[in-house]
């Protein structure tokens, strides 16, 4: 029986209240007490796991969440498009172009790549592929991937052919917690290690590729200089999940921690272009935490089974709840996130030596080592 | 260090538990009497439907099946193969809890019906807790009334955790629970942990909770007493110890008051930060113990907890790193277990 929704919270009001009180401590006591607020769940990662794919990666978290990503590239015939020179006459011509109508944004300065050249599918066990969660996850991942425009330009071969990139994301375990961060990191690793065959043909010839896999070029090109600091010029983005509870900010929350969150942010970031340290933000999205859907706890004073008096009407119950001063009763959080708190999260992510840099460097280190 | 990414684990050779632990078992030495389907290299792990042997001299045990009119023994579960003389049994890698009468279990209310609750006890089927099997407020062994039926949600509602005992088993294997004791009832002031794996059962030798004499015990910590409830079904609750719940005997006349006061409360007491930290530590250690494939019982938890506290204190005073926090709970427990084995 597949669950209809994304992992409904099934914690008792007493547990929710308890979890909240632990996470509100300064510093917060997390479910895994060895972890600090900025610590990620430890994970095991490997790449090049699928022999038939251009790039693949698998990451397993310590709590059993596991994702597998395969990147497959195919040569596809491009739709005829006007050359950059004939750009002036384009508006009149493009009216009949099917591809243009698909909500594709205007291309960037280079004007070669198209958004439809990257196709992403997210498969989560227990969910249909048109369920809200996989669709939402896929769109968030694609959005951050295509935002820079450099990836799609790299898929251009010549005016008649291009690479089509299929990114298949598979969550191997049930969606125990919100899997966005894990899927994003796995996709990052898979793309980082993807390679395309080297092109031998020239210009507008039919594409001919070098069949020597050793000669293949990485999808995300590395810097020319060989040595220890062979950092890639551009790296795919990565999404980190942060949650706020009271004044505390916690990264990479697990399922139980999400269940008591005040607000959850998904921050997509990639390595900074201008300097070698720090990172830049691509997008920030708020995610509705499941805590809003939890039922409130019944205080002893309103519970007839504990010697209290049950309120006569629902209006009466609401008034009594508002006046409630005791801390041990679970009340679902209301409202969103304060601006100051968002600023604080952003700072923690992008600063030099911040969370984003740590994550990107850690993923980079896997490929190197 | 906020993030730690490790290379994939190398395959751990599964040592044969039977050979290591039970010396009284005679192992079959010659591999020749086994069909070629069971290769030695595969660590004796079989999958459902895999033919174990076609030789008629073997007897089938747990987790195996012989199709009618054949001598082939087929595995029905995914697990490790065990040979006891001429008996073949497969110990499942993961199994659901099989309830037995008298087991102390922790459950979570899944649904509320007119006269009973359905409780998730990690078994193959939901258990039921009839309204007549709980202590009703306002008097011992009182008959349930129509009012109680209407107020059924004030006792337990969806999501609530409770500790109960298996009272009876139905013919389909589902269990019926009761909480007619002051030891049982709603759980609060603490943290819930679930273990997966072969909970209970005779075959579970690696990991999981063992049926034992004491499944509810208190742990002395620096900031107060913590009570740990180990449900046989693999559900664990670590909470602040409250006086009077057990320990001192409540007289039969006082029963009424103690029942009506806090038994069905879903409000937590005031908890000081010290005890919150210790509760988190204990439940993390239990998770680590399971990840290491160690048995979880009172003795083990107490020893690991005390050593972990000692090691942390040493780490603070000496300034050297003794506990490996990068590997999560498993890493911590591994370093603690290494110390325990080195010391004893």
Image: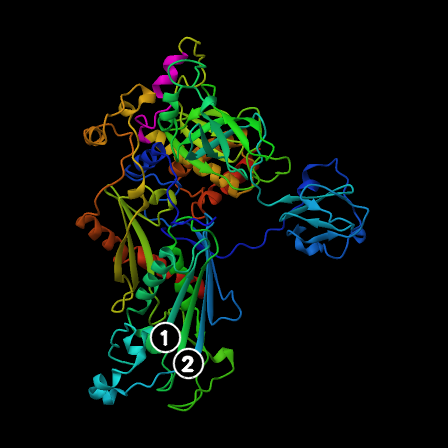
Disc 1, SS: helix
Mark 1 or 2 closer to N-term?
2
Residue nearest the viewer, comparing B147 with A187: B147
- What chain does mark 1 sit on? A
- What chain does mark 2 sit on? A
Above or below — where is B142 with respect to A286? above
Residue A283's image quarter? bottom left
Any magenta on residue B263? yes
Residue B185 percent coordinates (x, y): 43, 24
In the image, taking residue A190 as reference, residue B197 lies left or right, namely: right
Residue A266 percent coordinates (x, y): 30, 55
- Mark 1 vs 2: CB contact within 8 A: yes
Above or below — where is A353 with respect to A89? above
Q: Can see residue B313?
A: no
**Residue under circle 1?**
A117
- In the rendered view, how is the structure colored? rainbow
**Residue under circle 2?**
A76
Any magenta on residue B99? no
Range covered by the magenta-colored residues = B255-273
Residue A226 percent coordinates (x, y): 40, 74
Disc 2, SS: strand
Residue B166 percent coordinates (x, y): 54, 27
């Amino acid at each position: 029986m597949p669950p209809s929704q994304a992992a409904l919270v099934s914690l008792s009001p007493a547990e929710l209240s308890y979890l909240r009180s632990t996470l509100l401590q300064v510093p917060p006591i997390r479910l895994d007490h060895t972890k600090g607020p900025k610590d990620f769940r430890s994970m095991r990662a490997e790449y090049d796991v699928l022999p038939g794919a251009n790039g693949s990666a698998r990451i397993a978290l310590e709590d059993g969440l596991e994702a597998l990503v395969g990147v497959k590239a195919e040569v596809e015939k491009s739709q005829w498009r006007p050359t950059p020179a004939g750009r002036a006459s384009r508006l009149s011509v493009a009216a009949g172009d099917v591809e243009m109508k698909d909500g594709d944004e205007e291309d960037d300065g280079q004007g070669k790549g198209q958004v439809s050249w990257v196709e992403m599918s997210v498969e989560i066990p227990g969910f249909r592929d048109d369920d809200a969660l996989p669709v939402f996850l896929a769109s968030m991942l694609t959005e951050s991937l295509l935002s820079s425009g450099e990836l799609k330009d790299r898929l251009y071969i010549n005016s008649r052919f291009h690479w089509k990139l299929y990114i298949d994301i598979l969550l191997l375990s049930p969606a125990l917690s919100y899997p966005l961060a894990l899927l994003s990191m796995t996709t990052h690793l898979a793309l980082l290690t993807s390679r395309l065959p080297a092109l031998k043909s020239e210009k507008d010839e039919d594409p001919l590729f070098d069949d020597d896999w050793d000669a293949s070029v990485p999808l995300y090109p590395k810097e020319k200089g060989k040595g220890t600091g062979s950092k890639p010029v551009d790296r795919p983005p990565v999404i980190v999940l942060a949650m706020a509870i009271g004044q505390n900010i916690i990264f990479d929350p697990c399922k139980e921690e999400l269940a008591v969150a005040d607000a959850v942010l998904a921050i997509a970031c990639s390595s900074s272009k201008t300097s070698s340290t720090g990172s830049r933000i691509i997008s920030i999205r708020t995610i509705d935490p499941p805590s809003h859907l939890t039922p409130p706890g019944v205080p002893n004073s309103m519970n007839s089974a504990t010697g209290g008096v049950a309120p006569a009407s629902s209006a009466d119950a609401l008034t009594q709840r508002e006046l409630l001063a005791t801390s041990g009763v679970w009340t679902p959080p209301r409202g969103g996130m304060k601006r100051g708190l968002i600023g604080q999260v952003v700072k923690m992510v992008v600063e030099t030596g911040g969370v984003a840099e740590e994550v990107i460097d850690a993923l980079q280190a896997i490929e190197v080592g | 260090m906020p993030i730690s990414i490790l290379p994939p684990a190398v395959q751990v050779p599964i040592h044969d538990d039977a050979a290591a632990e039970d010396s009284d078992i005679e192992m079959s030495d010659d591999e020749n009497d086994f069909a070629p389907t069971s290769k030695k290299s595969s660590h004796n792990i079989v999958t459902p439907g895999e033919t174990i042997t076609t030789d008629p001299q073997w007897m089938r045990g747990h987790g195996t099946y012989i199709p009618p009119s054949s001598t082939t023994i087929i595995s029905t579960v995914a697990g490790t193969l065990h040979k006891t003389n001429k008996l073949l049994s497969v110990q499942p890698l993961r199994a659901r809890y099989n309830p037995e009468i008298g087991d102390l279990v922790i459950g979570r209310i899944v649904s509320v019906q007119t006269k009973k609750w359905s409780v998730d006890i990690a078994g193959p089927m939901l258990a039921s807790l009839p309204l007549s099997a709980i202590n009703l407020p306002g008097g011992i062994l009182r008959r349930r009334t129509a009012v109680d039926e209407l107020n059924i949600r004030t006792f337990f509602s969806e999501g609530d955790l409770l500790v109960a005992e298996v009272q009876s088993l139905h013919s389909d294997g589902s269990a019926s629970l009761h909480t007619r004791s002051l030891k049982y009832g709603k759980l609060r002031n603490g943290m819930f942990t679930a273990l997966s794996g072969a909970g209970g059962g005779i075959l579970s030798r690696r990991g999981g909770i063992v049926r034992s004499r004491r499944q509810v015990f208190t742990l002395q910590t620096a900031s107060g007493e913590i009570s740990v409830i180990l449900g046989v079904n693999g559900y664990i609750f670590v909470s602040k110890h409250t006086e009077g719940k057990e320990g001192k005997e409540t007289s039969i006349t006082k029963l009424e008051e103690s029942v009506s006061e806090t038994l069905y409360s879903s409000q937590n007491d005031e908890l000081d930060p010290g005890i919150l930290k210790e509760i988190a530590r204990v439940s993390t250690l239990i998770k680590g113990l399971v990840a290491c494939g160690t048995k979880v019982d009172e003795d083990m938890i107490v020893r690991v907890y005390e050593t972990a506290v000692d090691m942390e204190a040493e780490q603070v005073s000496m300034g050297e790193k003794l506990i490996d926090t990068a590997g999560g709970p498993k890493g911590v427990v591994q370093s603690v277990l290494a110390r325990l084995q080195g010391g004893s």
